[in-house]
Amino acid sequence: MPIEIPTLNVIALAPQIVVVVTALVVMALDISLTDKRVVGYVSLLGLAAAAVVTFALLGGPAQAIQQMAVSDGYALVLNLVFIVTAALAILVALGYLDERELQHGEYYALLLFSTAGMMLMAAATDLIVVFMGLEIMSVALYILAAFNHRQVGSGEAGMKYFILGAFASAFFLYGVALLYGATGSTNLHAIGEWFSPDRGNLGDPLALVGLGLLLIGFAFKVAAVPFQWWTPDVYHGAPTSVTAFMSVGAKAAGFAALVRILMVSFDQAFTLDWQLVLAVLAVLTMTVGNIAALAQKDVKRMLAYSSVAHAGYILVGVVPATMTGVKGVLFYLMAYAFMNIGAFAVIAVLEHRDAIGTALSDYAGLSTRKPFLALAMAVFMFSLTGIPPFVGFWGKLYVFRAAVEANMSWLAVVGVINSAISAFYYLSVVVQMYMRTPTDETAAAPALRLSGPVVVTLALALVATVVLGLWPTPLVNLTALGIFG
Amino acid sequence: MINQVPVSYYLLLGAILFSIGAGGVLIRRNAIVILMCVEMMMNAVNLTFIAFSRYLDSATGQIFVFMVMAVAAVEVAIGLALLVELNRHKQTVNIDEINSLKG
């Protein structure tokens, strides 16, 4: 067998490399610095550099290493989603970790490694690279979830996330193995070619089982029903700054790889089969997430179930397998990053001891105690419900429109009904904040302190949610660049 | 002529090992045994990869196995570290007793 000299185009992976190098610099600085907050600011600088590099690459698609990864519009737009997510999560962490005396440099290094893994998943065009990206992301997240070593709930969250994550990875791997056996390749384009109609391989049972196992692995990662039961415990136990990061980042990365695999490799093969499966999953995910969220008395847990429901809304955009759907998914992920991290930033402020102060009753009369905080939370809740003129409305509009265009109006109808159900629990937070007087217990709680970074996070998320809601054109134009190379 | 082992035997063994591992994760309550079961699932996948690699006469499968082995080692390290950390709070490795998060 002759050995081919691999083509290497490092520039195509420059954003990932910048993030990894920043993480290494952060680890080195962590040793020499006593004030670990500086490390956080250095991480932000690194992310800004990665964003600049991403914009610079937006010219045309470039293959990276032997068609293993690509920097096309799709990967680059998702890079921006991950960078925004990581930057907002770091800002939340700067304040949150300080108050709990958990300010360690490793936190930022792990968060950056996780971000690099997410970016690799979005760029991957080979199942090996998808797997590596998935593991780089997940392993860092397992540690981050268990980061609060003083509290048993955090360790428990890390352990649960780890066991179920590794379990899901094994299913994903088995799916890859069977696909490899059926098609003889792990390259997404090669698999797609193998399924082209003239090759007569449609409906191959081995490949079908492989795809099914692959979907199980992804359903775990994006918290879709029936693999959603880890979500509330992990999101509840993990430090709030970590929950904010992984609720958006891990979901976006899972969808990034899933959409590319379905669109590139399985465009022709079993389209009807997987579309039906994903449509059923979308309906179940939305409904189960929303109904479970209705019963929650704890805002952090409620948002965990709501994130399950949002995975369902995003799936609605995946099902049609059209470019309209892909753009809708990209828009939704970016919108979700702003509104969801904003909401978790508010929770991080109110949480005065670990996982205490997150109950719904703790929000009673917040509008009189901290008007700005209450206003921000209200906007995020309205946006998550999908009420215009906030950005969440456009996100839902675009994914539902993709379903309608693909003659799946029933799916959009289910989505709208679910949004109506979700209004009930989102608005109950607003009711608590504006129409209830503080209880004696809440009044006795320590005064709320708004640290500088948290104010910046809230302001950024608030401005993005409102401005992109009133004027979504820039974001629409950005997602229009999200094409496969 | 030497009788060769057909590829389907390896695949079947891989499937059986994977099922035992998956069953173990769901049934066993000892966190360390669960870790071992996850490892077993990964190695079942490795066996499948190598069988296919040999059958297809392609090196990709074997390269993938190296990646999986490295990742499996990382996962064990992380898993045991998390378990030691958790064991400091609760002197147990039984996952039924690790139940402070509910609701």
Image: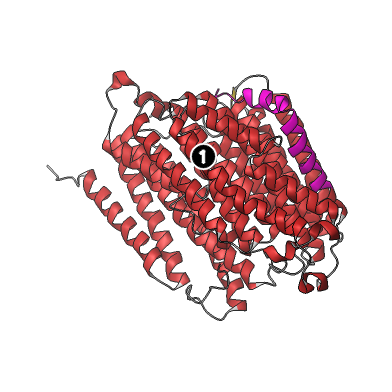
Asked whether residue A104 is in view, the answer is: no
Residue nearer the viewer, A485 or A95: A95
Q: Position of residue B27 (x, y in %)?
A: 37, 68
Residue nearer the viewer, B34 or A278: A278
- On what subunit does the disc labeled 1 rest? A
Q: Quadrant of the N terminus of chain A?
A: top left
Residue extending furthest toward the left = B1
Type of residue at label 1? Answer: Gly
Which residue is disc 1 drawn over?
A415
Kindly state the secondary structure of the residue where label 1 is placed.
helix
Q: Position of residue B3 (x, y in %)?
A: 14, 45
Up-down relation of residue A229 to residue A54 (above or below) = below
Q: How many marks?
A: 1
Residue at 28% x, 31% y is A203
Q: Quadrant of the C terminus of chain A?
A: top right
Residue nearer the viewer, A312 or A411: A411
Q: Position of residue A402 (x, y in %)?
A: 52, 27
Q: Which residues are magenta?
A: A456-485
**Relative side of B95 to A441, left or right:** left
Residue at 73% x, 36% y is A50
Q: Is residue A333 magenta?
A: no
